[in-house]
Image (spheres, rainbow, N blue to C red):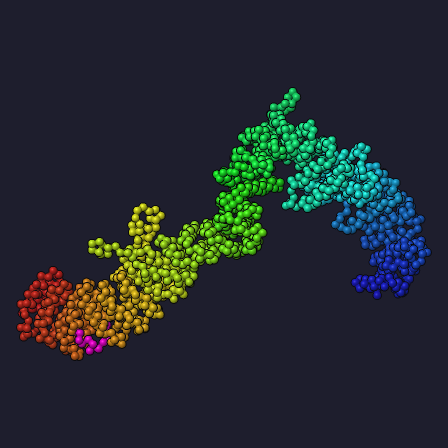
Amino acid sequence: MKEVDPQWQTAASGVLVALGKKYCNEVMEEILKRFQPGTLPHFFTVQTMANLSTGNPFSFVPFLTAVLGTMLPMLGLAKHDNMKWVFSYALARFCESILHYVANIEDAPDQSVRKELYSSQIFSAYEIVYNMWLQSKEAKLRLMVVEALGYMSNILAEDRLEEQLPRLLPGILNLYKKHPEPFHITQGFCMVLDAAVQEGSLILEPQLDMIVNTLHPQVCILPDYSSPPSVKNHNELLRCFSVIAKSFSDRIISYLLQKLEMNNEKIKLGTLAVFKQLINSGGVHMEDKKPLIVSGLKIMLSDTNNKVKRLFAQVIIAMAPHGYLELEGGHLMVEFIVKLCTYQEQVPVKKPDPDYVSNASLRQMCENVLHLISTTIECMEVVLWPYLLEFLIPVQYTTALGPICRNLASLTAKKREEQSEDYMIDFDIATNIPKAPEIVARLVVLAGRPEVSNRGIYVLKLLQALSPNIESSLIDLWDTIIPKLIQFLEDNLNNDEKWSQKAWEDLLLKLLSKTLDEVEDEEWVCNLGVEFGKQVSLYQDSPNEKNFLYKCLGVIMRKVTKKDFVKQHLNILFSTVKHTNQVEREGCAIGLGFCASSHLDEALSKLETVAKQDMSRKSSGFLGLMKDKTEADVERIKSTLMLCYGYLALYAPHDLITSRLEANILRNVKPHFSNIKDTAVKQNLIRAVDLIGKAVQPGHLRASYIFSRKVELMDHMQIFMKQESTKELATNTRALAMQACATLVKVDPVLKEAETFDLIKTSTDCVFKLPNCIYPVKGKEDLTTEQIKESDEFLDSVKDSLVSLLQEILNKNLSPQGLQEIYKHLQPWIISLENHERQRSMRTLLRLLQFHYEKLATQDSSGIVFFNLGSLLGSIVPRCSDPNLMVREDAIESIQIILRISLRYDGQPPEYKDPMVEALSTLRDRVSQGDAQVLFSVVNDISKALAKKMPSEQLNDFLANLYNGLLDSQSHCSSGACVVINTIMKTRGPELLAEVGNIINALHTNLRAITYPQTRSGVFRAIRTLASNHLTPVFDRLLNFPLPYDEHITDCWRTLAVDPVLAQAIFDQVIDMLNRQVHYAEKRDQKTHKVLLKVATIPTLSAVCALTEVLRVPETEAKVVENFHRLFSVLIVYTGSCIDVKPAKLSDVADGKISKEKKAQMKLLASLNPSSVAIEAVRVLLERANCQKVLEAIEEEDMINNLKELDKLPDGITAIAKELVEYNPEYVGKIMACLNPSLASLYESQRIVVVAFFAELINQKCGGDMSMVEMIVNNLLGRLVDANHIVRMLCIRGLGNIASAGEDQVQKYCTTVLSAMMAGMDDKEDPEDNITLESMSGLSRILTQIDESSIRPILVNITLRIRPCFEKQRASVRAAAFMLFGNLSHFGDGPSRAPFLEQIHTNFVSVLLHLNDEDVEVRKSCKHALRQFGPLLGSTSINEMFQKHLIVDGNLNYGEFMYDLTKVIIADFIQKINFFVMGNISFFRSTWPEIRSNAAIFVGFLLGNLPKAQHSLITKDHVCGALTLLLKDPVPSVRIKAAEAMSLLFEY
C-alpha cells in the first residue's frame, strides 16, 4: 500500500530492522522485491533499508552496490519532500555503514571492501542531492540533506571532494542564515571538514580563512545551557576547530592568539573555549605548539574579567596533564590559580548579569582546580614542589593559605612517605622558599584560627609533613602530638557546643612550648622568635591571628634567657599592637603575662615605661616633630596597660606576686578607678581586677591569702554595674564586672551578710531590669546582622556572668540557707509581669539549682535540714503553667532538681534515682504544648508528685507560697497554683487539721485580689476539699467571718454545698446549732426585769446566713428534699425567734478602741435584720424544695410583714401551714415531730410558732393523717396553761379547729375541747379578749358537729359566759359572741328548750340593739343569731320577719324594721314588754352612741305601739326619766333619737 500510516508502519519497520540484525539476507530479499527499478518505492521501504544498514553494517554493505544501482535512477523521480527526505536519510545511513565497515575492517567478513568502491555511486547521488535538494524550501529536508552531504563527503574521492569544496562549503555555511537551530548544519559541516583534512590534506587551505572567520564568531556566542541543541551546536563548533587544527595548527593558534588581544569579553571567552578544546583534544600536531600556547596565554594573566578568569582557569587545568605547565611560564599559571584562591566576595551589582561570576564561585572553582592538579596529575608534582611553599609568607596570599596548605600537605606527605629525592629542601639553594623558622612561625599562627577556610587540619598536616625539613629533633614530637591535635579539630571544630577557642590555643601553645623544649637550642628559639616578630606586619588586618602571634611570642620570651631579646620583643608587642582593638590588646597583654612568668621585673619595667612615655599626651619625639597624642589615644593605651597588669598578675611567679601586688600593680591600677570616660578603659580595668582576683586565689597561689583590697575592688565593680543603663545593652561592662565579682567572691576574707545582700541585689537588678529589646537603637530592623549578633552575645554573656556570680556566692555557703539568701532576690523577678524578666530569672534559678545539686554530689550533706524546700517549691510551682514556654520548661526542671537536692539532704547517695522525681523529665517534654488542657494535666501530675514528696513539716510553708501564687499576674499560673493546692488538700488534707483556720484566712484574703474566674473556682474547690477532711473546723471558721458575708465567703458556702456529703453535714451542723444555741440575747431592766432589748446572737445568725447560701445551690435539691422537715422546722422556729430582735450593734460587740475596718464591719452587721434573714432562709428553702405554692404565699408582702410582727406571726404561720399541708402534705408528719420539742422552748415566740402551726394542722386535717390529731391535741392541751396568752389563744384555736377534722374527731374530743373553750372564756389574763374570741369561734364551729346531749349540761353556762361578750369593745368578740349565741339555737329545741328560751329573752334586747351595731360583722352575727333562734321564740310572725328581712348580706332599714317588729312583739309577748323596756333602758348607759340611740328608739317604738290598755304595764316615770337624761347625751345623734322616742309617748 502506498499510503503512509506512521504509527503502525514505524513499528513494522522496527520489527524488520530487528530481524535484519540476525537474518539480514532474508529481510533484504523481501525488501528488494518491493524495491524495483523504475518505480518509486514506499517511504518505509527506504527507511527500513536505511536503519538496517546501520543496524547490521557487516551484512548490509554487500547489498549496497545493488541498492544504490536501483536507487540512483529513482532520485530524479522523487517529487515530494518526504521522499526526498527519506532518500537523503538513506544515503546518510548508507555512508555511515560504509565508514563503520571500513573502520572495523579487521572484524568484517569481507576485508577487501574499501570506501572507494562506492565513491562513484555516492558522487552521482551527491550531485542530485546537492544541486537539486539543498535549496529546498522545506527546512527539515535541508537539514537532512546537510547531514547526508557530511557523510557522503567522507566517501567521495579526494579529487572529487577538492573539486566540490569551493561550492559545498559556502553552500552549507549559507544555511546558517536560514536555521535558528544550526546544530545539524554544524554537524554536517564538521563531517565535511573532517573528510577534507584526512591524512593531513591541505585541500582546505583556499577556504580556510572563510571557514575560520565564519566559525569563530559563532563559537564566541555563549550557548544556552538550558537548551541541549544549543550546547550540542557549540560543542560541534569547537570540534570544527579541532578538526581544522589537524592540518593547520599554526594558522589556527596564531589566529586565536590575535583574537585574545582584542578587548572583547565574548571574543576572549570564545577563543579560550577553542584553546581549551585544542589542548584537550591534543594530538601530535599540538606538541610543538605548547611553548607558543603557554607564552601566548600569558596575556590572560592580567585580565580583570571574572568570566574570562574562570574560563582561563579551566584552560590551565586542561594544560596541566598535557605538560604545558612544566614549560617556562607554567609557574605563572599556577600563581594565577593561587591568586584566584585569595578572592573575597564582593558586593553584587544591583542588576547582575545572568551569567555573573562571583568572586566566591571563582575562588571555589580555583581551589578545586588547585586540589585537582596537585593530587591527581602526577606530572604536576615537579611544578608544585616546593614551589607552593613560596606562597606561605606573602601577605597577599593569606586568604588562599587554606587550599595552599591543603595541597601542600598532601604533596609533602606523599613525598615524605615515598622518600622522594626532591623532598628535602636545601633552603640555601632554594632562595625563594621561606626558611624553616619563617614557615613554623607562619603556620603556627595560621593554625591558631583553624576555622578560617577550614585550614587548621591542613596547616597541622603540613607542619607534620615538613618536620624533617624544619628540624630533625622535632620529627618524633610532632608525629606524636600533631595527629592528636588534628583529631581534636575533627571532633570539635564544626560543633559550636564543643568548640573552645581558648582550649585550642592552649593546646597549640603547649605544642609550641614543647617544641622549644625539644630543640634545646636557644639560638634556634631566638631565630624563631625573631620570625614571629617580623611576621607581625602580616596580620595588620587580622586581629585574631595577631592576638595569637603575641601569645606565641610570649611563650618564646618565657623560654628565652636573653634579656635583650626579651626587651626587644616587649618593645615589638607595644609598638605593633593596635590600642583601638580589644583582640590585639588582649593578645599583647597575655603575651606580656607569659613573659612575666620568667621575666617579671622586665615586664613591670616595660609597663611603667609605657605609663610614663606613651600615656603622656605631649610628644617626646625628636625635636617635638611627632604629633601630640589625643585624650582618646591616651585612654586606649591606658586600656592596654590595665589589661597588661591583670595578666601580669595572673601569670607572674606565685612566690613573687603577693609581694608585688600592692606595690607594683594595685598602686598603678587604683588611680584609674575614678573619672573613667572611656568604656574600653573601664572594661579592661574590670578585666584587670578579675585577673588579679584569679591571681590571688588559694588554688592559684597554692597557699592561703587574705586579700585586703577585696571589698574595695568589689565596691568599684558594683558602682560600674549601677552606672550601666537598664534601658539598653550597648556594652559588655556589666557582664565583666559580675565576672570580676565572681572571681573575688572566691578570695578570702568571706563577705559579710550585708555585703552579700548588696552584691546580689546590684547584680540581679542590672540584669533583670534590661528590656526585652536590648538593642541600642529604636528597633531591631535598624541594625545589621552583626550588630544584632553582638547584642545577643552581650545578653548571653550578662546572663552567664550573673549565674557565675551567684554560683560562687552559693558555693561559699552551700546550704539551704545560702540558697534562700539568693532566692529571695530572684523571687520578685520570677513573678514579674514581663515575660522576659520571668524567663531570665527562672533560667538563672535553674542553673543555680543545677550547680547546687552538682556540688552536693561531691560532699556529705546528710543531716542538713532542707528547711526551705516547701517555700521554694511553692513559689516555683505556678511557673509550671506560665504562658512562656521557656519559663514552663525551666520551672519543671527546677522542681525536679530541688527534689533531687532534697534526696541528697535526706541522705540518699548521688547515684540514687527516685522514679517519681525522674519521671518529671517527661512532663518537661509535654509542657511544650501551650494547650490549656495539656498544661492542666501536667501541673496535676506535678502536684501528685509533690504531694507525695513533701515532708509534713514543710507542708505549711509550701501551701503559704502557693497561696501567693493564687495572686500571680498570669492567669494560667494562678490556676496552676490552684491545681496543686487542691491536690494537697485532697491527698494531705488529714495533716492540715491544726492549720484549717489559717488556711481559710489566707485563701479568703487572696480571694479579694483574685480576678481570674478559673482561679477563683479552683480556690473554692480547695476549700471544699479541705472541708471534706475537716468539715467542723472549716464550718466553724467560715461561720466566724463577719456578717454580712462578703461574696467570697458566700461563694465558699455555695461551693461546699455542691458536694452532697458536705451539704448534708452542713445541714446537720446548722440544725444542731439552731436547736442547741440561743437565738438572741436579752437585755433586761435591772429593777423590773422587763426585757428591754433582744439582740441576735452572731453564731446562729451566721449559721442561718450560711444555710441560706447553701440552699441557693441547685445541686443541693436532693439533700434539701431529704432534710426538708428538719430544715423547715428549725428555720420557721428561728423566724419566730427573730421577731423584735435587733442585730448586734458596735457597742454590743466590743468595748474600747477598734479599727476602722472593724467599725465598718459592725455597721454592716447592724444593718442586717435578723427577721429578714430568717424569712429569706425560709423562702430559699421553699424554693429549693420546689414548694411553689408555699413560696408564693410567703412572698406576698402581707405575709412577710406577718412574719416580722409578733401579733401577726400566728397568721403568717397559719398561712404557711395551710399551703404546706395542701401542696406538700408528705412533709407534715416529720415537720410536726421536729417542731414538737420546741413547744417547751423558753422563747415565747418559738412556742407561738409551733402552736400556730399545730393549730392549723388540725384545721387542715393534718394533711389526711388523722393519727397526728391526738398528739397535737394533747400538745395543745398541755400548753393551755402557757404563760403567754398568745400561746393559750392559739391552743384554743387549734382545739377549735377540731371541727375541721370531721365528726369522728369532734365527738372524740368534744368534752375535752368544750372544757378548754369554757376555760378559755374564763381566762383572766386575756386583756385583748383574744382567748375569749378564739374560744367562742371554736365553740361556734364545734357546736355544728356535736349532739344535744353533749352540750345540754353546759348550754346555759355557755350563754351566761358569752353574755358579757356582747358588750365587749372589740367588735370581733361581739360578733363571735352573737354568732355563738345563734349557733347555740341548734340545741334550744329539745330538752334544753325552756332554759335556752329564757336565755333568748334575756339577751333578746341586746341582739336587737346590736343589729344596728357600728361594725358590719357584728350586724351580720346578730342577723345570724336572730334567724337561728327565731323559730324557738314561739312567734310565727316574729320568725317570719327574721327570716324575711334579716338577710345576712342584705341591707336593713333598722328603724322601719324595729317599728314593725315592736308591733309583733307587743302582739306576741305582751307580758315581756316591761322586761324588754327595762332591758333597753339599761343600754342607755352603753359606751356606743349607736347602741344608746338604738335603745332609745326601741323604747319609743315599744311604748308608742303599746295599746293604752297595757300602758299600766310600763313604769312611765322611770322610762321618761331615762329618756330625759338621754336628751342631755353629748352625742347629737343620741339626743335626736331620744327626742324621737319621747315624741312617740304623746299618749302617756
Chief SS of the magenta region? helix
**Percent from the top left, x then y, of residue 373?**
79, 43
Taking the image as shown, residue 889 lies to the left or right of residue 1482, namely right
Vertical relation: 1287 (above or below) 537: below
Taking the image as shown, residue 254 lies to the left or right of residue 1488, namely right
Vertical relation: 1091 (above or below) 1478: above
**Percent from the top left, x then y, of residue 1531?**
13, 61
Is residue 1245 one of those drawn in magenta? no
The quadrant the C terminus occupies is: bottom left
Is residue 1352 one of those drawn in magenta? yes
Residue shown at the point (85%, 53%) measured from the top left: 147
**Residue found farthest to the bottom:** 1390
What stretch of residues is rendered in magenta? 1340-1355
Vertical relation: 418 (above or below) 684: below
Taking the image as shown, residue 1425 lies to the left or right of residue 1037, namely left
Q: Is residue 549 visible?
A: no
The quadrant the N terminus occupies is: bottom right
**Percent from the top left, x then y, of residue 1149?**
31, 51
Residue shown at the point (57%, 28%) measured from the top left: 663
Taking the image as shown, residue 150 lies to the left or right of residue 829, namely right
The one nearer the camera, 1014 or 689, is 689
Residue shown at the point (19%, 64%) measured from the top left: 1326
The one nearer the camera, 740 or 1101, is 740
**Residue found farthest to the top:** 623
**Percent from the top left, x then y, of residue 1193?**
32, 64
Q: Is residue 511 visible?
A: yes
**Residue found farthest to the right:** 112
